[in-house]
Amino acid sequence: MITGGAGFGEIARAMAEALRNSAGTAPATLQLRHTGGVVSSCAWSERRGNLSVDFLAIAELLRDRPPSALEVRLDADGGYTFTARPDVAAVSPGRLVFDAGFRYPGHPRPGLPRPAAAEPTGAPTDPAVRAEVTRLTGEFAERYTAIKGGPPPWPAGRTEADLAAAEARIGVRLPEDLRALYLVADGDPEESGLLGPYSHDSLTVLVDRYLEGDPGSYGWEDEPDDDGVVFETAPAGHVKRLSRNDWWVTFGSDRSGNYLAADLDPAERGRPGQVLEYGRDIYGPLRYVSPSVTTMLTEVVEALRAGRYEDWDVPSVAPETELRGDPARSYDEVISNAADIDLTATVAGLPERDLVQEVYLNDAGDVDLTVFEPLVSLRSLHVNRARAVTPAIRGLEVLESLQITADRVDLAAVAGHPALWDLQLTGVGAPLDLTVLRNPAAPDPARPGEVRGAGLGAGLRPAGPARAETGHGPGARPARLGPAAAAPGGVVRGGPHDAAGDARTARRLRRARSRGNGDRVLRRPGLTPRGNGSKAGHLPATACREVAKVPAAAINAGKAQFVVRWPP
């Protein structure tokens, strides 16, 4: 079935075919948002979660069409339903943004204070730094020539005037050694090996990339509902724990989807000009590459001096460096079949457990979360398919996010945690009393929170009274929590969807975000019928805005998901 006007038949068939190639025989949904200049996608199936769909050919079909929102839903029997709407904002599911300026902790809006190191002064490059970079690049060129039989194929360098003009455009003074590098060569398009596995972009590309979208957003834009915990980059204390920073300036890449950024706003132990990496192969926190561009050049030249390199039949020389060394351990840990193991001994025996920031605990029976207290850096904990959970987390002092799928949860054990701002409960069959989460120090506690019908997506408001979304579809009654039931300021939301919290899905989402694949975060759950009669995500806006008075009382979650958020 096709709705949405004439001329969409070819597009509908192309979307259905592309989705079927990715989803197989499973019911699945593909949504495209065509703004007139950009086409973004979101795709998921009930079996595999988020999907990657090749929609480039479809984007070409949309090129000369006016902005629109398109959706294809595949049925298990092979049929599909296509819908097109002329208003991008009307794409299913609709989303109401109450405060576009709100961000969750660690997700700042643009406008961060400019550090002194980033002030564009127009002054020439530091002579000592320029001399050192010139010496290192000169030695690299000599050794490259000896290996390849000709000089490195670098473009001519820029001038001080070029640098000053570029910095005036972006409002940032580049690190002194990066400035010096541009005075030698305006990029390294042939990937000579000057920065090891990376190469720097031209100055023009650097400027254009910085000015595109929000500065420092490294690969995607932080929207109000981007609520992921931001993890610490190793070594600790060098990089600010932020999802983006105005003063991260992308200047190069490995030409394979991973990018280098100069950090002009480091944490306490870092230094301005330190080099970070983000992109396709970086999951979780940014990767710390080197203290500076100068250090990178030094490591490359030292490798060539020692004869530690490979000479490929391409313009590149491949020096053997530690610039892409793997970390000692991953920031996350997956513990499976937890009911069948000695969980206390397993946690105590984790290698370098002080580096563990995220844990997925799968298939536990009855579990008390005090078992994780040895993990002093734990910020995100997912408990999947447990029987009963006692979330005694006072000893997990930096924990920010707790997601639990269990039959029973003792919410009283969560109350008063100093850092927790994200609590998600799924599949709880026993009644839940949210009054235990009330913060007695919250300002103006007499103001009630909101309880609204499922389907509005993430609640988007700054710190204030809690809100909840509960119910199962269009028939659910929005309600209002009285003062006694108001949780701490933030968001409480719920919906009848499955919140599968496995590491593979989380990593796939992070990879999708770093690739900049459009709208893909917090879109899959609860958007289409899930076999229980619910159509969360398709509530009319008028129903979503209704508010009815009900007595303050405990909230019976049934089999719905609840999400509770509040600022630290």
Image (tube, grey):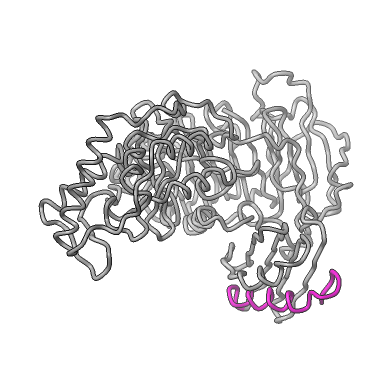
Quarter the N terminus occupies: bottom right
Residue 18 on the magenta segment: yes
Q: Residue at x 78, y 52 (%)?
A: 89
Name the one closer to the observer, 301 or 328: 301
Q: Is residue 316 left or right of residue 469?
A: left
Q: Is residue 218 left or right of residue 536?
A: left
- In the rendering, at what x and y percent does residue 210 appear? 52, 43
Name the one closer to the observer, 33 or 16: 33
- In the rendering, at what x and y percent does residue 470 appear? 76, 45
Residue 550's quadrant in the figure?
A: top right
Q: Tell me how many marks there are.
A: 0
Res 280 seen here = yes
Q: Residue at x 47, y 39 (%)?
A: 369
- Residue at the limit of the structure toward the left, as seen here: 306
Q: Residue at x 70, y 81 (%)?
A: 78
Q: Magenta part mainly helix, strand or loop?
A: helix
Name the one closer to the observer, 215 or 136: 136
Residue 2 on the magenta segment: yes
- In the rendering, at what x and y percent does residue 566 appear? 62, 32
What are the residue bounds of the magenta stretch? 1-24
Name the one closer to the observer, 383 or 44: 44
Q: Is residue 535 left or right of residue 172?
A: right
